[in-house]
Image: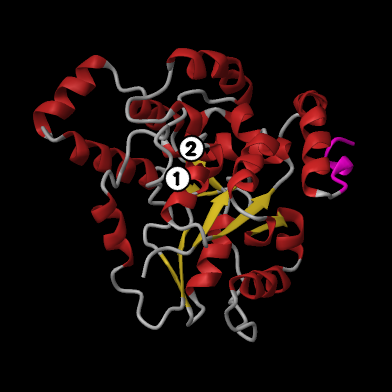
Amino acid sequence: MIPDFFLVGAPRSGTTALCNYLRTHPEVFVSSPKEPTYFGRDLQPKRYPTLESYLELFCDVGEAVRVGDGSVAYLASEFAAEEIHAFNPQARIMILLRNPVDMVFSLHRKHYLMGIEPCRTLEDALAAESGRLANGTGVPEGVCPKVIALRYRAHYAPQIQRFLDVFPASQVKMFLFDDFQANPARSFGECCHFLGVREDILPKCGPHNVGREVKCASWHEFLTRTPRWGQFLARAVVPFPGLRRRAQRFLLRKNHCEGKPHEMSNELRNQLKREFAPEVTELSKLVGWDLSHWSN
């Protein structure tokens, strides 16, 4: 079997929780890792660069009748929609949408903890964004600029339109993060109905992607902005780049702990609400929902 449904985003909108719920369904298989990000030729570098390496993720689907890929970066890609359609024109597309202000705040924090966002504050990351998209300024090696470009990823309407341009509306299902968070069992049932699998399966609903914080800020900064002497030492001790990156991710995770999420200042929240208001209006017209509360 090949993937026949794709959970394409938006980021920080419940995609991980939904994929985990789907993994508990006996008729559904979701790839591991959840986000292989094979499609989208503008999403570089690739973890699975060949079709063969990608399809190996789906070689043991068991009794599943639906096979899925949960790569949220596809929504940001200019080419993923048409590539997925060329690969499987019968595929089902699922999109979760979150208030762009909250999404941007949460995504920045995630990227910072992962070590792919060098800017500690959201304000600094937003200020750096134009240079990142224009010429890759300040983008860490091995990171796609579109992935960490926060404003770009918050412009949902043109991203969704790319999928609606190639897939019929009957094959595209959208959910609101707020609805999913308020009643995950109901949203899961809607998802099962959309996929055409049994709807009597109840997921074990629990917390996913709980808030994390950095234990030692100076150690985090050293790991993500390693000085030249540290880079030289790391290359001497671990000569393989891939292994160095895995070691960095391991050390970053060891420096994390559960913590209360930071809160956005009212000033910045109001600024972003005003900035995203035209986008919210455009999105409301596209999907046929009243989303004006996102801008109030």
Question: For mark 1, what is the residue?
Answer: 83
Left or right: where does residue 246 sit relative to residue 112? Answer: left
Q: Position of residue 146 (x, y in %)?
A: 50, 29
Residue type at numbered disc 2? Phe
Mark 2 element type: loop
Look at the picture and state if 57 lies above or below 43: below
Choose top left, top right, bottom left or bottom right for residue 128. top right
Q: Residue at x 38, y 30 (%)?
A: 143
Question: For mark 2, what is the residue?
Answer: 79
Q: Where is residue 259 in the image (x, y as percent from the top left)?
A: 57, 48
Q: Can residue 250 be seen in this view?
A: yes
Mark 1 element type: helix
Residue type at numbered disc 1? Glu
Q: Do the numbered discs 2 and 1 sit on residues whose CB atoms are within 8 Å?
A: yes
Q: For residue 98: magenta?
A: no
Q: Residue at x 85, y 35 (%)?
A: 295
